[in-house]
Image: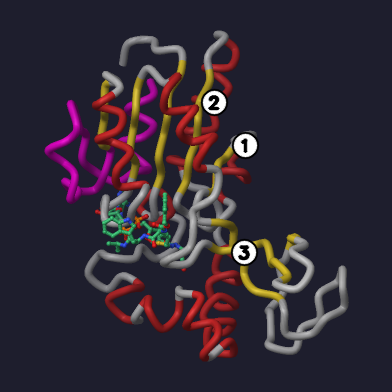
């Protein structure tokens, strides 16, 4: 790779697959076993909060038990490398785990929220959260019971940090998508936006994604191999 100053990296579930966290749309993936409309929408939470809490409690304990893999570590090294040379890594993740942060990335834009945070629907306070959540769990700030939800962006909800993401894309020299199927918008549209801005686009994935034809270049293989190779 040449030496660009600013790199925008969009990560998806594939970057955490080798840490043991399941992907969504692969064969055997989460959404092939569970219907996202019954688990990952505000309507599902209103209808059956106990079921939705159970699903996210399981995933939260899975994240706590997982560890970053060489793909996460390589992206943390890339951030330091670019910063030391006056550039920047804009790391935007669709993942709700904290593995980029634990690997050492300082600035991570979690556009679909974070599993290790809970938000109160009554007072809007966001709390760091590692325990199981139940329908009757009181909010530590306002003490109201039944008002806490995972601080996750569900289908039909507005993703987070959209302005910062747009600004980062506009100052990037290279766009790299890692381990994402390109099925969920608005993230799936960023490669087209990058192309419009004249930014060189790379795909790093196990196999060609839905958007593969939109990338200028690609490397296919496990993220733990292709990401470290790409940055050296
Ligand atoms: C919104 C949290 C309004 C939940 C998630 C345009 C057209 C059609 C529909 C829409 C559209 N725009 C919006 C929509 C609606 C909808 C949408 O996109 N629907 C799709 C399904 C058609 N979008 C929304 O509702 C979004 N909100 O649009 O608001 C708005 C927005 C902007 C401006 C104005 C208005 C909100 C979407 C958020 C949904 N929340 N996550 C939870 O986690 O429980 S989505 C879910 O998919 C995941 O959580 C993840 O975040 C996301 C993306 O999936 P991927 O990360 O790509 O994972 P996937 O399994 O699909 O792929 C894994 C890839 O890794 C594969 O390619 C595989 O080959 C690869 N891989 C596997 N192993 C490895 C590997 N690669 C490397 N190494 C390996 N070892």
Cα separation, mark 2 vs mark 1, equals 9 Å
User: What residue is pinned by disc 2?
Assistant: 79
How many other residues sit within 10 Å of disc 2, few (<14), some (14-19) or many (≥20)?
many
60 or 138: which is nearer to us?
138
Secondary structure beneath disc 2? helix
Work out whether mark 2 precedes mark 1 in sequence or the reverse, and give the earlier one: 2
Cα separation, mark 1 vs mark 3, equals 22 Å
Q: Which mark is residue 74?
A: none
Tell me if 222 is positioned left or right of 72 in this view.
left
For this orientation, the residue located farthest to the left is 213
Q: Quarter of the image containing the C terminus? A: top left
Secondary structure beneath disc 3? strand
Q: What residue sits 49% from the left and 28% below the top?
A: 167
**Residue interval drawn in magenta:** 204-232
User: What residue is pinned by disc 1?
Assistant: 104
Work out whether mark 3 precedes mark 2 in sequence or the reverse, and give the earlier one: 2
Work out whether mark 1 precedes mark 3 in sequence or the reverse, and give the earlier one: 1
Cα separation, mark 3 vs mark 2, equals 26 Å
User: What residue is pinned by disc 3?
Assistant: 151
Whereabouts is ligand 1, in terms of quadrant? bottom left
- Residue 63: image location, x then y, percent: 56, 63
Tell me if 136 is positioned left or right of 195 in this view.
right
How many other residues sit within 10 Å of disc 3, few (<14), some (14-19) or many (≥20)?
many
How many other residues sit within 10 Å of disc 1, few (<14), some (14-19) or many (≥20)?
some
104 part of magenta stretch: no
In the displayed structure, would residue 87 be above or below residue 126? above
207 part of magenta stretch: yes
Tell me if 50 is positioned left or right of 145 in this view.
left
């Amino acid at each position: 790779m040449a030496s660009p100053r600013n790199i925008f990296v969009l990560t998806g579930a594939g970057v955490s697959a080798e840490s043991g966290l399941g992907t969504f749309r692969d064969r055997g993936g989460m959404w092939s076993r569970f219907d996202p409309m019954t688990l990952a929408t505000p309507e599902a939470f209103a209808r059956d909060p106990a079921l939705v809490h159970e699903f996210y409690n399981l995933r939260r304990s899975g994240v706590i038990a997982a560890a970053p893999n060489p793909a996460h570590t390589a992206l943390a090294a890339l951030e330091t490398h670019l910063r030391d040379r006056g550039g920047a890594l804009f790391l935007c993740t669709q993942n709700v785990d904290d593995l980029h942060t634990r690997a050492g990335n300082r600035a991570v834009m979690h556009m679909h929220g974070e599993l290790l945070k809970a938000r109160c629907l009554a007072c809007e306070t966001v709390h760091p959260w590692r325990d199981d959540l139940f329908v009757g769990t009181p909010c530590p700030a306002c003490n109201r019971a039944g008002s806490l939800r995972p601080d996750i962006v569900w289908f039909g909800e507005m993703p987070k940090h959209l302005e910062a993401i747009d600004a980062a894309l506009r100052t990037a020299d290279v766009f790299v998508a890692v381990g994402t199927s390109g099925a969920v918008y608005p993230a799936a549209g960023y490669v087209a936006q990058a192309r419009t801005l004249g930014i060189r686009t790379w795909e790093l994935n196990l196999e060609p994604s839905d958007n593969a034809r939109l990338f200028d270049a690609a490397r296919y293989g496990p993220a733990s191999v292709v990401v470290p190779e790409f940055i050296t």
